[in-house]
Amino acid sequence: MICIICNDEQPASEEHIIPKAMGNKNFVTTRVCEQCNNKLGGYVDNYFTDHILIKLIRKERNWLGESGKSIKVFPDKAKDENTGRLFLFRNDEIVLPPDVKIDGNIMRVEASTEEEAIKTARKKLQRMKLSEEMIQEIIHNRDASEKMQPITPEFKIPADIDKGRSLLAVVKMAYEYVHLKLGDAYLENKTARDFRQELFKAIQVEYNRDVVLNYNFIMHHAQIAQNGIKELLNYIVPLNRRMSVPIRHLIVLHNTCDNQLVCDIFLGMIDIISFSVLVADECPSYYPHGKVFISIIFDNDDVIDL
């Protein structure tokens, strides 16, 4: 087949139109070669799916992706903005690192739990070469009455995002979807050719610093859901909650009253990660007049095309 990214004749591979990490197992195209598939996943898809906002949604929805491993949202450690104290994150739960202070014959241990405090004290006493009998006596006679007040640390977790690079992942979804529905004729459209060029540059940019992507073009053609899409979501979401198998993702391809061709992508049926992509500045003459293409991915991984 001819790859719709590099335009070379290559063996086919399964490219997930919506990234697998977003809970899409079965909705794929086979018109992307393996090399482009892997590089798009690394530079384009992963940048989008690994953003902290998307990770929080993925974790809440249990969208594990290729590895099947639990999603880790927060860094391994971070400092409290108020006190400067270091805290750890274990499975995204805040943990106070154990701390031992010795003043004369008094040992004071701070930890998240009494169990962890005892474990920390035991290790310290063992390093002090005390006998097991003496360690047992000290731990047995411990005073656990002095407890710290509840700590409410504050953290600043970086959540910066390159909007153009993030929207490139959305353009990739729309480009692959429209080709899936309209076939190779769409590849001759000027907007499609520009999309392909930017996606092809994206698979080279990590290895060639001279490659510069046109993010202004990307941001002009892709944007977060505007009022019209939000109104549609406000109508669909209550209905979706009553369905026996809810909709996970929804893609709609349609023309507009301005004779443009637009692809609306509803990820997770959530407005802040739903997008509208202008996939053709002028609706192609071969597009069926008044026709709307709809693809639905359900929570049980079934896919229906309308």
Image: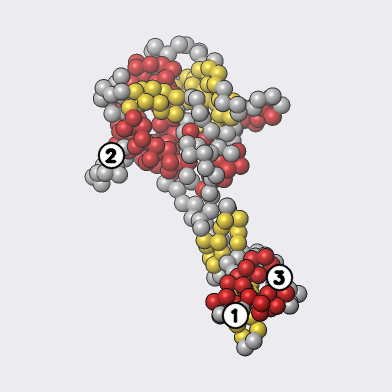
**Neighbour tally class for label 3: few under 14, some 14-19, many 20 plus, Cα within 10 Å:** few
Front tag of 1 and 3: 1
Quadrant occupied by the C terminus: top right
Which structural element holds mark 3? loop
- Asked where in the image residue 191 lies, by quadrant, the reply is top left
Q: Secondary structure at mark 1?
A: loop
Residue designated by label 3: 149
Specify which label sits upstream in the sequence, 3 or 2.
Answer: 3
Residue 296 left/right relative to 174: right
3D distance between C-alphas at marks 3 and 2: 54 Å
Rendered location of residue 30, percent (x, y): 39, 22
Residue identified by numbered label 2:
204
Q: Earlier in the sequence, mark 1 or mark 3?
A: 1
Give the amino acid type for the residue marked by disc 3 in the picture. Answer: Gln
Q: Secondary structure at mark 2?
A: loop
Q: Is residue 74 above or below residue 198?
A: below
Real-space CA distance between mark 1 and mark 3, rounded to the nearest whole angstrom? 31 Å
